[in-house]
Structure formats: structure tokens, C-alpha cells
Image (cartoon, grey):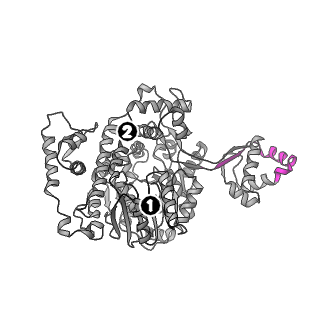
Amino acid sequence: MAEIQQILKQYWGYGAFRPLQREIIESVVGGRDTVALLPTGGGKSLCYQVPALALPGVAIVVTPLIALMKDQVDALRRRHINAVAIHSAMSAREIDLALDNCVYGDVKLLYVAPERIETRIFHTRVKKMNVSLVAVDEAHCISEWGYDFRPAYLRIARLREWVPGVPFLALTATATSLVLEDIERHLGLDEPQIFRGSFARPNIRFVVRRGENKAEQLVRVVRRVEGSGIVYARTRRATEEIAAQLLAEGVSADFYHAGLGFRMRAAKQEAWRRGEVRVIVATNAFGMGIDKADVRFVVHDQMPASLEAYYQEAGRAGRDGAPAYAVLLHNGMDTTAARRRIESAYPPLDTVRKVYEAIFNHLQVTVGGGREAVFDFDLEAFSARFKFFSLTAFHAIKLLELNGYMTLTDVLDNPTRVMFRMSREELYKLQVDRTELDSFLRIVLRLYTGLFTEFVAVDEAYIARMSGYTEQRVKELLYQLSVMRVIRYIPRRSSPLLILHEERLPTEDVAIAPSTYHRRREMEELRAAAMAEYAESDAQCRSVILREYFDERGAEPCGVCDVCRSRRAEEMYRESDAFAGIGAELLRVLGELPAGRSMSVRELVARVPGRPMAVLTMLRRLLAERRVRQLNDGGIVSV
């Protein structure tokens, strides 16, 4: 199609599409339901942005990441593409205006968080829109088999009823066959075209470095590999400590995590992107949607929770096709730490209910109230007040989130908002009487419109630059006008938000579904086992392990990973008789269970001979091949 090629060139300046992009776009433009499984760096966003411009109407893009949503809207507007977003950090008036523009204006892309889909205002307005397509980003979140299941994604299928006949495009970077089946079923896709990109990254050398002194290993990698890099750490404190260690070694480094303010995060990210900082040390809050192709190395200081997460983060290296490294630092404590993290992620159900009750008491919401309310929420202050360990409270909230009660967002930057209380005539009288305020008021009125009818986001630094005042003086003047009741003034804040989806229930009525507790815990143990098997294996090509995990069969050894370079080919890829025997023993044990009985993952690991990680890895394979089945309570049965 000449038109999509022209759009690509006009708005993005590219002369050609990446592999599978053209086929996916042509499928969507042709009105077909489509599933795109493209590895990290495969250019998923263009697969819905180009069709949005090629088709009449507005494209709805469902994504769970508010920060990424904001970044994409800003990037599209810089390309002179009209895009808007709606999410829970916005006021009702802002959401109303954004949806109005989608109905009556020339908006081409509407980004929406899944939680907003069933709100009354969205339901009413979407039926009036000329919708061109529905794109579901991070589509693996719809599957309980996925590593990042979000119940709100199950609501997306309602759009099928409200905008019938509109093609759906589901996009994900990491999905096994089980997850893909869930995506098709839960979205109600009609004979979708499925496009799978290969998980092979031939330019990336996957390496595991073992040793107790990880700091020494990291410095060795940074010194041997030229160019910019990312180091992933599990905690905010670790990012700061590792960055300090690198600086002490003379390496240009900085840290990044979600606890920093928006401006600070943006400044650090931009300095790294421009090459002013060589190494950024970050939690997994960093990297989504970042357009930097020349990352030469990605190092993980700790094992991620799953191979899905590891592949996605490691895949941020070498997007330009030039040689790059993905290095995992590993020692004997990592596997034990992974087990402990899973245990802490599932606090006792009585504790979950106590956290639920304490949250509503903290927010002063009575039984029957609170539905769709949004609150600033300081987890540390809440935990201290009610004497919970903050990590326990966090995981309890995440379990409540999985069951649809509430959502706790990451830190969000909400800009200063201003709205005049006075009419224009009253304000004119004030300016005459208070000449010392006249100049400042004139500048604000010149820089911003709509101040008399709605809250408008303003930037104190921009006002200072345009007026000659210091930023601190601008804040003081805005506060003074607020005290004088000239304006309504909501200062900038950076805080997580707690969004309540349901009214408060009596504590004894709070139900936690077995599928989100027992079954999910068992699945996390399987994913952790696969991650540990990758880290501890010396017998199989790293790339082959990754590609087989994502059900890409027949993968050839890469020849460049640490295993390929250290072992003879005939030794590497021959699965031992013992490993093959584990599968047969698992099937035998399950086959001998009485009718109606199941066996937990832990019981199977204790019963079947072999290394626990090898048993768990083989069990995951049998589940993927549908030779065994997992029940909602987590128990395993033969098929």
C-alpha cells in the first residue's frame, strides 16, 4: 500500500518498515483482527499508529502504563499528530474535554487505561465516536498464564459490543502459546491473523557471569564493552549504591527509579539518551518506550522474576543491529532470594483483609462508599500508621488489585493547576486596586487560556522564564492569589494514586479468588524455576533456552553466548537421559493419582527425583504442551 509507506516517511522519516510491520499494518487496515507478537525493539507502536493515520476516525489504544501513555502522546504531538490520553490522574473535567475532542474533533489516537473502559462517561462517549481500530498494547496482561496479569484487561472485550465491526489489534513482546490462546479467547478475536516475530537476537551475546563479588564483575563488563549501557537492579536503594560504586571507579553513571520526581527522571533519562551519562542504573521502571538504539550492554545485577521480564529488559540492547551484550550476574544466593520473594508476595489472606480494612479507615471511607474515588497514597506513611511492613502492605494491595478492588499506580507527576475564582470584571478591579499584582496577572493571562472556565495545567518554570521572576517567586505569587481567593491553586505533586474500583465492603466479605492466590503463586514458582535454570545451565545455548521458552521450536545454537563459546557443540545440546526421565516420572506420578485428586507443585518436586529446578522446568513444558493441567487452586492433574 503506497499510502502507509507515505505516512511512514512523512511522519517518522523512515524509508522502510521493520520485519512484519507492513504485514501487520495491512492486516489491520484491511479490517482483520490481528495478533502481533514482536520481540522488544520490534516497533510495535507503529503497527497501530500508522493504521490510525491511514483510516478515518479515531484509534483507541489500551495500555496499562500511564507514564508511557503520556510519553507517546507527547511524541505524537511533536510529529503534529493529534493524540490524547485519559487516565485516573486526570480530573473529570479534563477527561470530559478529551473525550469531547474524540467525538467532535480531529483526534487520531485516544490512549486509555483499561480501568477507564467501564466508566459511565467513557461508555457513553465511545458509542458516539467514529472508531477506526482498537489496539491492545501489552496484551499478555489479559492472561492469567502471563507474568503480568491485570484483571482490568478482561473488561476490554466490552468494546466489542460498543464499537461492533471494528478490527482489534493485540500486541505483546512476550507470550507463550498458552498466553496467545488466552488473548484470542478473552478479546473475542474473530479468526485473527497471527504474526510471530522470531525471538532470535543474533547480534546480542547472552552471558551469565558467576561469582560472589558482583560489583567486581560489573566493573569488568563496563570496562571491556565500549558504549552506553543499562544496569538493572531490583531495589531503588541498590540503583543508588551501584551508581555510586561505578562513579568511584571513574565510570560516568547515574541512577533512575520511580521514587524520583518526574522532572528529575526526565532529566536523567535525557542525559543518558544524549550520551552525557554513559551508564544508567535503574529498576525495571526504566526502559519502556525509550528510543535509544545504540545500547551496547544490558547488565542484570539480580535475577529477574521470569524469563519474560529478562528477555524484554535484555532486548533493549543492540536495537541498531550492531553487536551488544546481555549479561546476568549470578551467585548462589540468587535462587534462594527468588523463592523468598515469592513467599513474601503472598501474605496470609487474613493479613490481606486487615490491609483492606486499614486502607479504608486511613482514607476515611465508610462501608458502601468510595466507588471510583481516587486518592493520593503514601504507602510508607500508611504502613507506619497501621504497623505493617511496607512490603507486606504493598503485596496485599497488589492481591486486592488482582481481584478488582483497587489499583495502586506508580509515582505520577501531576502538574500545577490553576483556575480563576473571579469573573473577568472582578479581576479587572483587583488589577486596578493592586498594581503590584497587575503585571504578574497579565503575564499568566497571556500565557494560558481557559483559566476562567476550568483548571489549566501551568508550569511555574515557564512562567518564570517568560516573566523574569524566579520560579520560587512565581510559586509565592500563586499561593498569595490563592489565599486572596482570586484563584483556585493546586500545586504540583508527585505521588502514587490509589484508585478504588468498588465500594467498601464489610471486611468479612472481601474475597480473594484462588486463581489469583494459589494458582498464581504456583505459576510464579514455575517461572522462577525457568529463570534459575537459564542462570544455572551450562549445557544449552542461552539463545536456544530463551527461544524454546517462547515455544519457538527448532532453534539453532547462536554460537556467541558464553555456553556456545565454552563447550563443544556435540556436548551442549544433548539433553541428558536423566532430564528426559523427569518428564516420564512426572506423568507416571500424576497418572497414578485417584480420580478427583491433584498434586501441588511442591509435592511433585518432593516426589520426583532430580534437581528441583529441573523438575519445575519440565513441569512447565508439560503444561505448555497440554499433557498436564493446572486447577484454580494450583493443583496439577494429568490430562
- Residue 356 at what x, y percent from top left? 46, 32
Give the CA separation, mark 2 to mark 1. 28 Å
Q: Residues within 10 Å of mark 1 (few under 14, many from 20)?
A: many
Helix, strand or loop for disc 1: strand
Q: Earlier in the sequence, mark 2 or mark 1?
A: 1
Q: Is 472 rendered above or below residue 123? A: below
| Residue 32 visible, this angle | no
How many numbered discs sit on the rendered protein? 2
Q: Is residue 395 left or right of residue 253?
A: left
Is residue 435 in the magenta section?
A: yes
Helix, strand or loop for disc 2: loop
- Residue 294 at what x, y percent from top left? 45, 70
Q: Residue at x 77, y 60 (%)?
A: 468
CB-based contact (under 8 Å), mark 2 and mark 1: no
For label 1, the residue is 231
The answer to which image quadrant residue 47 occupies is: bottom left
Q: Nearer the viewer, residue 288 or 237?
A: 237
- Residue numbers of the magenta segment: 414-438
Q: Residue at x 87, y 46 (%)?
A: 433
The answer to which image quadrant residue 299 occupies is: bottom left
Is residue 272 in the magenta section?
A: no
- Residue 627 at what x, y percent from top left? 18, 47
Q: Residue at x 28, y 37 (%)?
A: 632
For label 2, the residue is 346
- Which part of the image, by quadrant, shows the N terminus? bottom left
Q: Is residue 239 left or right of residue 492?
A: left
- Which part of the image, by quadrant, shows the C terminus? top left
Q: Is residue 424 left or right of residue 449?
A: right
Q: Residues within 10 Å of mark 2 (few under 14, many from 20)?
A: many
Q: Is 196 rendered above or below residue 402? A: below
Q: Amino acid at mark 2?
A: Tyr
- Residue 231 at what x, y percent from top left? 44, 61
